[in-house]
Amino acid sequence: MSKGEASFVTVNYTLLTAMTLIIVLPFWYVLAVSVTPYHVFSEKNGLILFPRSFSLQYYEYLLAKGSLVYSSYANTLRNTAGGVLLALFLTVSAAYALSEKKLPGRRIILLYFIFTMLFKGGMIPAYINIKALGLLNSNLVLILVMAYSAFNMIIIKSFFEGIPESLKESASIDGASEFRILWQIVLPLSLPVMATISLLYMVVYWNDFFNAMLYVTDWGKAPVQLVLRTIIANSSLPPELLEAAGSAPPPTIGIQMAAIVIVALPMMIIYPFVQKYFEQGMLLGSVKG
């Protein structure tokens, strides 16, 4: 390499290394503090990078028998699984219909969906609507409230439009219904974009706590993110968590760090397995978008 190329590569590697450290070090610190006894944390004034003492007291407290974390985790898993399935069904159905150029009023319907991306009623009308439907403090509200995204629909629609029409026409001539064409031809060819949209919906449902703050008042129906938000924002534990533990809580700083690890770990485990589909889907869906 020439001197200019070598300098360019060196600067790139330096910047990428610095960016990686900026991303990794905060989570590593959280993990280190979560397994460090509080007296060691105090002695080091909170500067813990490599824990010399190891303790799981914070995890044992959060995951004690009957803890609120279990029920809230179950709520989050239910909301995420049900929400992703419902959102995919609605999004794929709309995208497939709008990808058909012969659909009457296709352009007007598409503009209607785009309008919802630009203008929204706001938080108060949404709350009034949810209340009028009798969904407040229900198990369905956190699934239904985020079950559709016009942006994701446009990505899938753009991908569907790239599938050769000859495949669908051949199946139609052989007597296949629209549902069968979608299920057996279009979807198998759309695995990258489907994995991408599934991941996007999964992250949205998994990380949601704001809607739970608005529409859920029963801790038995609260997602784990709301529990984490309460621990971090209020520097205190929900009363239900204190009652379930039945003992004096450890220092809050350790519980905050352990709670972050417990909530973030599933997404960190899942993402590497779908990362390649995520990258492919975003690129392929953006060609015509």
Image (spheres, rainbow, N blue to C red):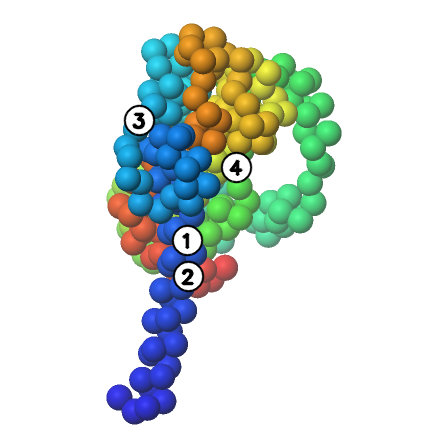
Q: Are marks 1 and 3 in contact (CB under 8 Å)?
A: no
User: Which numbered disc flags the more N-terminal residue, 3 or 4?
Assistant: 3
Depth check: give the residue in front, 24 or 106: 24
In the displayed orientation, state which residue is furthest to the front: 43
Could you tell whether 207 is left or right of 283 in the image?
A: right
Residue kind at label 4, given as amino acid type? Tyr
Could you tell whether 220 is left or right of 24 in the image?
A: right
Q: Are marks 2 and 3 in contact (CB under 8 Å)?
A: no
**Location of mark 2 (residue):** 19
User: Which numbered disc flags the more N-terminal residue, 2 or 4?
Assistant: 2
Depth check: give the residue in front, 5 or 62: 62
CA distance separating discs 2 and 1:
6 Å
Q: Secondary structure at mark 4?
A: loop
Q: Residue at x 59, y 52 (%)?
A: 107
Residue 40 shows up from this direction: yes
CA distance separating discs 1 and 3:
25 Å
Q: Is residue 149 above or below residue 54?
A: below
**Location of mark 4 (residue):** 148
Depth check: give the residue in front, 262 or 198: 262
Q: Is residue 74 above or below residue 94?
A: above
CA distance separating discs 3 and 4:
40 Å
Residue 251 in the image: x percent, y percent? 46, 25
Crowding at dot 4, Cα within 10 Å, few <14 / some 14-19 / many 20+, comes out as many
Q: Secondary structure at mark 1?
A: helix
**Location of mark 1 (residue):** 23
Residue 248 in the image: x percent, y percent? 45, 13
Residue kind at label 3, given as amino acid type? Leu
Q: Are marks 3 and 4 in contact (CB under 8 Å)?
A: no
Number of the label disc, if any, that sits on residue 56: 3
